[in-house]
Each structure stands twice: as C-alpha cells, then as structure tokens.
C-alpha cells in the first residue's frame, strides 16, 4: 500500500528544493475551481493511459478532493514503480494547514503565518514579551503557539478589513487570548470592538510601533486599513499584493470602489520609500511560496512588476472594472458571519470558505 502523507508533513516540502511532484488527479473543473499550486493535473480516469507524462526523477504525492481518488492513483503509480505517497484528506486537509516564516525589522519580529491551501497570510508582530496579531484565520491555537514559542503574550488583535473570502478568527482569538480587538468602524461590524483611528500608534516593548493607516479613500472594502511596522514594513491587507492589487467589485460598486482604490494606492502606498517591504493578506496561484521565506516584496520592485500601479485614475478604473469576475463562493454568507450577523455554535461553518482566495484584481 502507498505511504500516507499528512498536510502538515507536505507543507514542509512544497516549494523547497528537491521537493516532490504534486500530481492532482481531480477532474479539470475541480482543479479550475480550486487549483493546487504547482501541481500536474491528470484526472484519475486518464492516469493509466498517461503514465508516460509522469516524471520518474522525483517522488510523487497524489492529491484529490478528500484523499480517496488520490489513494487509488497512488496504488497505480506504485505498481508502475514510482516512489509515491498519498495526501491524506486531500484538498480539504490542505486548506487547513499552516506554516510560518519570520521577517525581522529593527525593533520587532514579524511572523508570517501562511495558510497554504487558501493563500491567506496573517501576522504575529512581537517584541519583548508582547505580540499583536493581524488578520488571523480561525485556528486560534496556531497564533497562540507562534507567540508562545517566542515568549510573547498576545495583547491586541486586528483585522485589516471585513474579509469576504475566508472566515476571520480575530474575535475568537481576542477572546481566547484575553486581548483587545481593534477594527475599522467603517466596515459594518455588529459586535463590540475598539475602533481604529488613522494615525493611531500601538507600542511594543523595546520601541517598536504598529502604526495605523485607515484608508479614507478605500477600495477593497469601505473599512480597509494598513499597518506599518517600524516604518520598515507595511501590512497591506487586500489593498496591494505581490502580484496585483485588491479587486474593487466585491461590494457591487465596482467603478466607485475602483476610483477609491486608485486613490488609496496613490495617496497611501506609492509615496512610501522603495525599500519598504509590502506584506499582503493574500497571494495568488502564480506566487512561489518557499519554506522559511516570507511572501512579500519591496515597494520598488512592485512599482516595476505590477502594471496597475502606473495607471492614471481613468485608465485604472477602466482596467479594474473590465476585470470584474465571479465573486468568491458564499462570500455574502462569509461577510455575514465575519461582521457578526450570525455565528454558529460551537464553531464556525468552515465549509463556507472552501476553495482559494479570490480577492485580487
């Protein structure tokens, strides 16, 4: 029988030099709806006739939705002489696995928490014995562990905006850690929190500061917010990514929000120095993720690689509105949960957020 590999084991290998080949045996429509980054797709029913297309020079990990079809595929490959393992739990398990990478600024450490199957990025910023968390996903223990391993206690939790593609864990983490919860009141949250104000600063031991930039001309949502750490890094939320900018059509006001987004970029992002590191809340399928290296880029690099940043307002609006695509599945229900309008007990309805992020334009 083929070896079984857990998502936690696989996440340490994907993107690393000499890592395995991922063989996705789902049907093409399933892959289109939720691709696994870097995987070769050969549907299970075609595998026996296409074995010649599967490389023999590296180990194989087979993938499907839940781990059943991929186990059959692994058996076919093993019988043909391949070194192969099956991803236990398939994409369902991959969507819940995390890894971390650390980025150092002068007076603090930034731990990037990556939810690889969703392309979601969140951050634990720590110095001395304290830490702040920005954009946490549902699994609060991941952030508690990241902080605890470094001798930090989580004292504040933030979201950059009202998320539409995944369920926020900010409220749950704040409750678990006994931390204060800070949000932009421009988004329609219906539970208690501490409102953020533009220019507000939160100090950490040793002199590090988390500075707030509330976007008065928002784009992705009306309450979009960015956070600066020691003037060296910007946690950009869904305003700008390493491969694009935030999509402005989630609120069904695409032209208005596209103009706002252009204003946000022009007034809050582009005036920053080229050596500021942009650390976004998401990344797309084309972004390489390497173990122990943060997903991020210097702003000077993004000026060259993200064409939208060079467009004037009218050209930007035309470009952005022409790229309107299908909204994330269940995004209305996800927003409703995240704003506090509904909350299942004892947990959140995780099935709402299955699939990749779709927050970039």
Image (cartoon, rainbow, N blue to C red):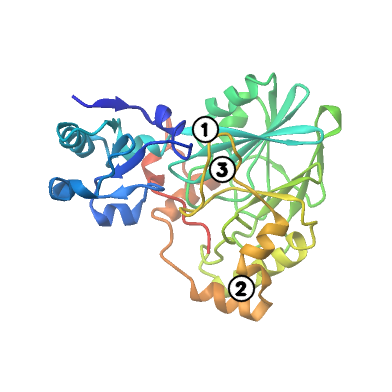
- What percent of the width, then of the height, locates residue 258? 61, 71
Q: Is residue 207 above or below residue 304?
A: above
**Which mark is nearer the camera, 1 or 3?**
1
Q: Which residue is mark 3?
A: 121
Number of numbered tags placed on the structure image: 3
**Closer to us: 92 or 41:** 41
Query: At 60% from the left edge and 55% from the top edge, which residue is drawn?
Result: 241
Q: Which residue is mark 1?
A: 99
Q: Which residue is mark 2?
A: 256
Measured Cα–Cα span from mark 1 to mark 2: 37 Å
**Which mark is nearer the camera, 3 or 2?**
3
| Left or right of residue 202: residue 296 | left
Mark 1 crowdedness (10 Å alpha carbons): few <14, some 14-19, many ≥20: some
| Left or right of residue 266: residue 43 | left
Ranked by sequence position, the earlier of labels 1 and 3 is 1
Identity of the residue furthest to the right in this view: 207
Ranked by sequence position, the earlier of labels 3 and 2 is 3
Query: At 68% from the left edge and 77% from the top edge, which residue is drawn?
Result: 312
- What percent of the width, then of the height, locates residue 67? 25, 35
- What percent of the width, then of the height, locates residue 353? 41, 45
């Amino acid at each position: 029988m083929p070896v079984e590999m857990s998502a936690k084991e696989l996440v340490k290998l994907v993107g690393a030099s000499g890592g395995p080949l991922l063989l996705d045996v789902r049907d093409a429509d399933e892959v289109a709806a939720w691709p696994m980054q870097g995987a070769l797709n050969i549907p299970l029913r075609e595998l026996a006739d296409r074995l010649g297309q599967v490389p023999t020079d590296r180990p194989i990990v087979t993938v499907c939705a839940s781990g059943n079809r991929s186990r059959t595929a692994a058996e076919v490959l093993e019988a043909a002489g391949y070194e192969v393992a099956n991803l236990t739990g398939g994409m369902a398990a991959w969507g819940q696995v995390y890894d971390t990478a650390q980025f150092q600024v002068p007076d603090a450490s930034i731990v990037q928490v990556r939810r690889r199957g969703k392309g979601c990025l969140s951050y634990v910023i720590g110095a001395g014995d304290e830490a702040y968390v920005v954009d946490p996903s549902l699994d609060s223990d991941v952030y508690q562990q990241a902080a605890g391993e470094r001798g930090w206690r989580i004292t504040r939790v933030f979201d950059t905006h009202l998320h539409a593609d995944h369920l926020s864990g900010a409220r749950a983490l704040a409750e678990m850690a006994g931390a204060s919860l800070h949000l932009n009141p421009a988004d329609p949250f219906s539970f208690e929190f501490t409102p953020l104000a533009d220019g507000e600063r939160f100090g950490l031991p040793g002199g590090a500061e988390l500075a707030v930039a509330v976007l008065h001309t928002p784009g992705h949502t009306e309450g979009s917010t960015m956070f600066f750490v020691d003037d060296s890094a910007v946690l950009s939320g869904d305003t700008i990514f390493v491969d694009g900018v935030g999509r402005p059509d989630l609120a069904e006001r695409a032209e208005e929000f596209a103009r706002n987004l252009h204003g946000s970029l022009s007034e809050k992002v582009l005036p920053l120095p080229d050596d500021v590191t942009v650390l976004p809340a998401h990344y797309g399928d084309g972004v390489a993720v390497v173990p122990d290296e943060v997903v991020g880029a210097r702003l000077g690099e993004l000026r060259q690689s993200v064409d939208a940043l060079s467009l004037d307002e009218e050209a930007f609006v035309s470009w952005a509105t022409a790229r309107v695509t299908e909204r994330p599945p269940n995004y209305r229900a996800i927003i409703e949960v995240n704003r506090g309008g509904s909350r299942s007990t004892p947990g959140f309805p995780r099935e709402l957020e299955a699939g990749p992020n779709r927050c970039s334009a």
